[in-house]
Image (cartoon, helix red, strand yellow):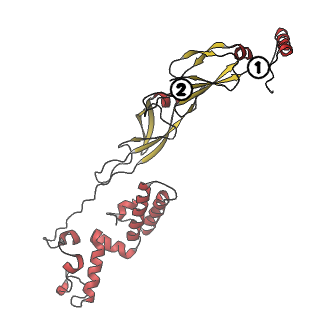
Amino acid sequence: MPDDPYRTLGVSRSASADEIKKAYRRLSKENHPDANPDDAAAAERFKSVQAAYEIVGDAEKRKQFDQYGPMYEQYSRAQKAGASRGPGGGNPFAGGGVDLEDLFGGGVDLGDLFGGFGGGGRKRSRQPRAHKGADAKLDVTVPFTVAARGGGHDVTLDRGGRTETVSVKIPAGVDDGATIRLAGQGAPGVAGGAAGDLLLTVRVAPHPVFRREGHNLVCDLPLSPAEAALGAKVDVPTLSDGDVVLTIPAGTSSGQRLRLRGKGVPDRKSGGHGDQFVVVKIVVPKDLGDEERELYERLAAVSTHRPRD
């Protein structure tokens, strides 16, 4: 049973039955397991909401809770037991009709159960238990280079209507869909409990040149037919070291992958780096000049290369 069903439902003790019902329906919908798969915190909140409404959603139970607090169920059993034992009528404490040792077991503090009526009539206040706040979830889009090489990235958070910017350390080589936990950045705790955590789901933005295959980087390299046939030395971009010179072997075909070792993404497990693969794309001219056309025609006449054979 929740310590305070009113607090669980987010309503005041003077709330009407309609207000309680509306709060119950809203919270049940927000925390329903079907809407929050694999979210244990939401499942616990859903159970608490159901238990809270079972108390204050029932007029008789609500009346008893308002009068006797969280121990109202024990009082109700005591009242029924007193009525069944005769003397004292429905009063469980009149005429010795009820043995509280039988009802609650040994070691019962009547001040805790019924507000301290035996200690000079002073009611003891009940302190709510401290609970950790709920975890929050947020998707954050990180630039491709930051995700690959690591670094700081600012994230804007909404704190109850006001915005706050926090700097998040992105580990080098983080994968798309990975989760980063920020301790204490979630919902505030209850009754002095610790704040929940913020779970950031990383979404890696696309890059105009590179794409990732695990810890390897891949980029396309356009070549002319002459460069592919005769071989060449060309500049190739890398993510960490700028342009490097790559030797194109003579007779390189379109689609062939050339390797640049150690130019990929850092691997946190091994401490090394992946590789960069350069995919050859042979690009032929769309518009030929007269001399170029003549040379291609001469090449076609003397060439013995038959790729379809």
- Label 1: few (<14), some (14–19) or many (≥20) C-alpha neighbours in 10 Å: few
- Disc 1 is placed on an element classified as loop
Measured in 3D between alpha carbons, the distance from the residue under mark 2 to the one under mark 1, in whole angstroms, is 29 Å
Residue 13 x/y as whole percent: 35, 65
Instruction: Assign a secondary structure to mark 2.
Output: loop
Q: Residue 303: x, y in percent? A: 82, 15
Which residue is the extreme one toward the bottom?
A: 86
Q: Is 152 situated above or below 60? A: above
Using residue 223 as the reference point, say whether residue 195 is left or right of it.
left
The tag earlier along the polypeptide, 2 or 1, is 2
Q: Is residue 116 visible?
A: no
Few, some or many residues within 10 Å of mark 2 (<14, 14–19, 20+): some
> Is residue 73 left or right of 100 when viewed as pictured?
right
Which residue is drawn at the image coordinates 72% and 16% (left, top)? 229
Rendered location of residue 27, percent (x, y): 45, 59
Residue furthest to the left in view is: 120
Residue shown at the point (29%, 73%) measured from the top left: 72
Instruction: Pick the residue in front: 90 or 16.
Output: 90
Residue 89: image tag: none
- For the C terminus, the image quarter is top right
Q: Residue 159's image quarter? A: top left
Query: What amino acid is found at the position of numbered circle 2 in the picture?
Result: Asp
* Dot 2 and dot 1 residues touching (CB under 8 Å): no
The residue lying toward the viewer, choosing from 307 and 25, is: 307
> In the shown orientation, is residue 189 left or right of residue 102?
right
Comparing labels 2 and 1, the label whose residue is closer to the camera: 2
Reading the image, the residue beneath label 2 is: 275
> From where the camera sits, is residue 29 visible?
yes
In the picture, the disc for residue 284 is: 1
Q: Residue at x 21, y 88 (%)?
A: 88
Foreground residue, 234 or 138? 234
Q: Quadrant of the N terminus?
A: bottom left
